[in-house]
Amino acid sequence: MKKRVLSGIQPSGAIHLGNYLGAIKQHIEMQQNNNYDCFFFIADLHALTTVRDPKKLADMTRDVALTYLSLGLDPEKVVFFKQSDVPEHTELAWIFSCITPMGLLERAHAWKDAVEKGKKEKTAGLFIYPILMAADILLYKPSLVPVGKDQKQHIEIARDIATHFNTTFGEEFPQPQELTPEDVAVVPGTDGQKMSKSYGNTIDIFAPENILKKQIMGIVTDSTPVEAPKDPSKCNVFQLYKLIATKEEIEDLESKYKKGGFGYGEAKKMLLAKVLEIFAPYRKKRIELEAEVGYVERVLREGANRAKIEAQKTLDEVRKMIGTRP
């Protein structure tokens, strides 16, 4: 029997190398595994906690869809849809909000961070964000939810909410398990911190070549002179190259570092060439898909129709259990 896999990605800007290596690459590989029944969605409702520009949200949502499709996601093999196109997400979230203890939400990392640092507007949406996320997950009753190591709490909260519902109304929701690949490294940004749009340190894989070059040539390095040997383990350029190059290519660059007479500028050029080589067919595919008027919208609409079949099954069961549909 196939294991159902579910994962979502929030539309928050251009997809970068960290997004690809940390999540999207694994999602696309999963669709080839006959043991998995994959549901992947764009979490546009979650983006409303920070995005208030309707055109920007629509554009970013379409960009995420285009990126997945360009990188090889096959909408015939997976259920690929937009969260807001399946209203069962928000109905289940409201039902969950009526049984979820406040204390559980107050312990959520995103809320605690907002309170302590004052970086975000403290809205009700930000506070109940984990409830909508739990609804996103439990609505499809997945066995596995791929997440990064820093996102495991979201699955823990979803399991807690499932337990609260099952205890209150009867057994309905299974306990989803997080899938955290051990071999997925934290992708460093151009400044050495974790690659993130919020840090402004990304390498955007579909950016025009001149912008991509500017991002990579701007990677922060130390002041070791060209002629001196260098420690590859302490270099951001090498760490990024190591994530996408072959074993032989990595060994060759490592040798150049240790030998000396090789500058960081040359290493950056090698990284740029490698990024362009790997993503060339995907960049070409994206241009082709952008020319197909209505293609992305059609894919998302058809995916939503498939997702609704499963979502409605769950909601029908829940409505009977809580008494809104005797």
Image: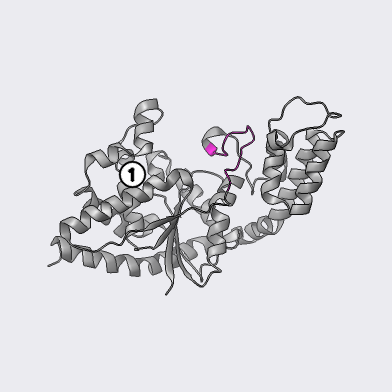
- Quarter of the rendering occupied by the N terminus: bottom left
Secondary-structure class at tag 1: helix
Please tell me whether residue 232 is drawn above or below residue 318 in the rendered image: above
Residue 185: % across, % down: 58, 46
Please tell me whether residue 312 is drawn above or below residue 92 in the rendered image: below
- As for residue 296 lying within the magenta part, the answer is no
Q: Image check: 296 left or right of 129?
A: right
Residue 299: % across, % down: 49, 65
Residue 298: % across, % down: 48, 65
Q: Residue at x 56, y 45 (%)?
A: 14
- Quarter of the rendering occupied by the C terminus: bottom left
Can I make out residue 113 in this image?
A: yes
What secondary structure do most residues of the magenta stretch adopt?
loop
Q: Residue at x 78, y 26 (%)?
A: 224
Q: Which residue is mark 1?
A: 129
**Residue density around tag 1, few if under 14, some if 14–19, many if 20 or more, within 10 Å:** many
Residue 305: % across, % down: 39, 68
Instruction: Please state which amino acid type lies under the numbered disc 1.
Output: Tyr
- As for residue 186 lying within the magenta part, the answer is yes
Q: Image check: 9 left or right of 326?
A: right
Q: Image check: 68 left or right of 156?
A: right
Please tell me whether residue 204 is drawn above or below residue 75 in the rendered image: above
Residue 210: name its quadrant.
Answer: top right
Residue 49: name its quadrant.
Answer: top left
Q: Which residues are magenta?
A: 185-197
Please tell me whether residue 36 is drawn above or below residue 129 in the rendered image: below
